[in-house]
Amino acid sequence: MEDYTTLKHSDNGMPTWDGFLGPTLQVASTKELWKLHDLENNVIKAVNLPDNLVNLRYDSRYHDLVAENRVNFAISDLKLSGLLHCPKRGCSEISDLGKRTLSELGTDITAKYVHSLPKYVEYQKQRKQNSSDETADNDIQSLELTEGQIHNWFDKQKENLSDELLTKLRKTDPYEFEHMMIELMTRMGYKGADGKAFVTQKSNDGGIDGILNQDALGLRKIYVQVKRYAEDNTVGRQTISQFHGDLDLQGAGSGVFITTSSFTRSAEEAGKKFNIRLIDGEALTKLMIEYKVGVQVRQTFELLEIDNDFFDKKDN
């Protein structure tokens, strides 16, 4: 079983709801029938979640446990996709499809895969149809969502946005993509207050696609190489080693390599060895969303609470 540190996670180290998909299906396969709470607890134990994350709660009047809530969300999607099913109320078991998936993919099960399965696609189709009905509208309005469910809903929206963003990036003109990546690093603060950032000329760039001068004189530079690759076109060790050679010619001891695909394990090892920061498609879209590059705010929601200090002042 994978340790929690290897799973997709939030900034505080807590695995995201979809990070729990693989481990949940794996644990479900170890016993014929599971009660919901038992399955949740065993998944949390299986990934060696430390006590501080096990006991972490949402800051709301419900004070839901974050880990338990996210595992519950993973269980829900596994059921909707047919990887788990409920032989009786309050119980779950792995389905034949779930067993085949586990055999083929192991615990490397993503939200994208789960949401592509026929049963889940049909569920979404039916849900959209129902949402147009007055009865369904009334049902939705009567639901009382916990803060944990709201957080997980936003996580799902981010996941969908990341997928859409990555698809769009892979269709972007390569030279324009280079400009976008330099814009991203500028937004992240790597240009410096008095520095400059620019994309190198298409010809004779010496393997360097972009340069960020971190000061007015250009004494401190960051060299960037970007590859707008398809999902299955992974970046290997040879490409990273070549970039290291290009950096060496510039007298640079480090660099940044960005791709819309992913890196092989040997490429990741080379990146660590040569002090090259590797940013794959998943990390890239996360950064673009965080620094609002290529995305915009569609709608903002505020969650209000009673200001007790205001009332305490009035009482005194």
Image (cartoon, grey):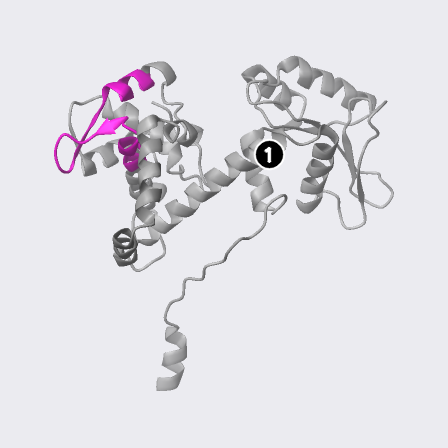
**Residue 88 among magenta residues:** yes
**Residue at 39% across, 34% down:** 18
Which picture quadrant has residue 254? top right
- x and y, in percent, of residue 90 in the image: 15, 38
Q: Amino acid at mark 1?
A: Lys
Answer with left or right where residue 263 lies relative to residue 245.
left
- Against 232, is 210 above or below? below
Picture coordinates of residue 27 (x, y %)?
Answer: 26, 25
Task: Identify the residue at horizontal 29%, vertical 58% (top origin).
Answer: 141
- Residue 156 x/y as whole percent: 42, 41
Q: Which of the 4 quarters of the picture holds residue 85?
A: top left
Q: Is residue 105 left or right of residue 234?
A: left
* 301 within the magenta span: no
The magenta region covers 74-102
Quadrant including the N terminus: top left
| Observer-nearest of 142 and 224 | 142
Residue at position x 73%, y 20% from top? 244
Q: Which of the pair 244/261 is nearer the observer? A: 261
Disc 1 target residue: 168
